[in-house]
Amino acid sequence: MSREAAEFALGARAVERDRISGDLLDLESHTTYRLLKDAHLRGRTRQRWEQAQAALATMWSLNDAYREVLRQAERIRAERARLGGDQLAALTELLAGPSVVVKAPPRPVEQRSLLPQPDERLTLDETVMRMDTAFQAATDALTEIDSTWTALLPRLDAADSALREVDALLTRLGETADLARTRSDLARLRAAVLEDPLDAGSAKQELDPIARFLADTQAELEQALAVRDEYGRRREDLGAALDRVRAAESEARLAHGAVVAKIALPPQAQPRSRVAELAAELDALDAAADSWSARAKRLAALEQRAEEAAQRARTTAKALFGLVGRRDELRGLLIASQAKAARTGMAEDPEAVRLYAQARALLWTAPCDLTKAASTVDLYKRAINGGGR
């Protein structure tokens, strides 16, 4: 090497050494790396991490040898201000030649020979490439393990937190629940994920239903707690809801009474009251010895049925009054059709005359057979249109 080339190569190697040292320090400070060093691993993860550790051991050994060569080169450079021929030759050998000595690894006795095992010699570039291969093997294993821990451990933590919250809610409610199986499953899944994350693929599928169960249970208990704290108010609100049901059913009965005199109604059109049934359920709820969780569900269901009963009664009243409107609509349609028949010369047609008289008798007779009247009006319209629509 020339003096300039030697100076440049030595400076570049110093920068490379610092960069490699920074990468190795980052690896050692990585959270997952530190956890793995003390973890009790098993299965495929243990095998993979042992391979990674072997690669790391090789990398550190190479790094020590690499740094020793650079220290020798720096000592030679520090001997004189201006490099001489002997120094340049030595630097050339260290920086460009096979200067890194890799000791032959020890072998099992059955693989040994009484002859000395030759050491391997590498250039600095070859050493860096081999270190990088070992580094990649370690970081690949680290990344794969870390991705599983990152995906599952927070979810396990969340499930454990939800379980603690469920316990706290049960205590506040003074209730108990059999959660032993859930605790056991979470402990088993956590051990599987921590000890063998590379073979914990089924943990996600097992964790999903547990998380849903805990979320549903927590929601139910929170609702039960709210019911306990608000029971008096919601009890009054439910009483008011039953009053609304009574009013709506009274309106439906009045509608039925008014309409049945005008429109022929089937027996099933008679409005059926739900108030007595709902009131009895409310009384039973007051006297129930159920847990607040069960009472919360019953109260919510009763509130919904009361709202549905009131809405059903209002719909019934509206439908009944709509039948009178339909009769009046048919009356108007019959009168308009008669006027059209007069304009088109069909007013005196015998069939048209017969159908008109039949339709009029049906529509102006109480109670009116609405179905038959609608059919007759339709036949009359066809007759005055020559049999068409």
Image (cartoon, helix red, strand yellow):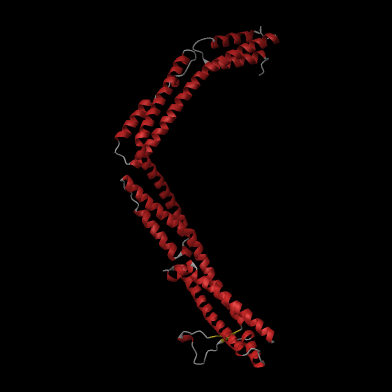
Residue shown at the point (59%, 80%) measured from the top left: 127
Q: Position of residue 10 (x, y in %)?
A: 63, 82
Q: Is residue 5 left or right of residue 36?
A: right
Q: Position of residue 349 (x, y in %)?
A: 66, 8
Residue shown at the point (35%, 26%) measured from the top left: 276
Picture quarter with the C terminus: top right
Q: Is residue 64 left or right of residue 123?
A: left
Q: Nearer the viewer, residue 295 or 319?
A: 295
Q: Nearer the viewer, residue 332 or 84?
A: 84
Q: Is residue 202 visible?
A: no
Q: Is residue 229 left or right of residue 94?
A: left
Picture quarter with the N terminus: bottom right
Where is 217 relative to 357, above or below? Answer: below
Q: Position of residue 228 (x, y in %)?
A: 34, 40
Q: Position of residue 9 (x, y in %)?
A: 65, 82
Where is 109 relative to 198, above or below? Answer: below
Q: Is residue 189 visible?
A: yes
Where is 310 relative to 97, above or below? Answer: above
Residue shown at the point (43%, 64%) measured from the top left: 194
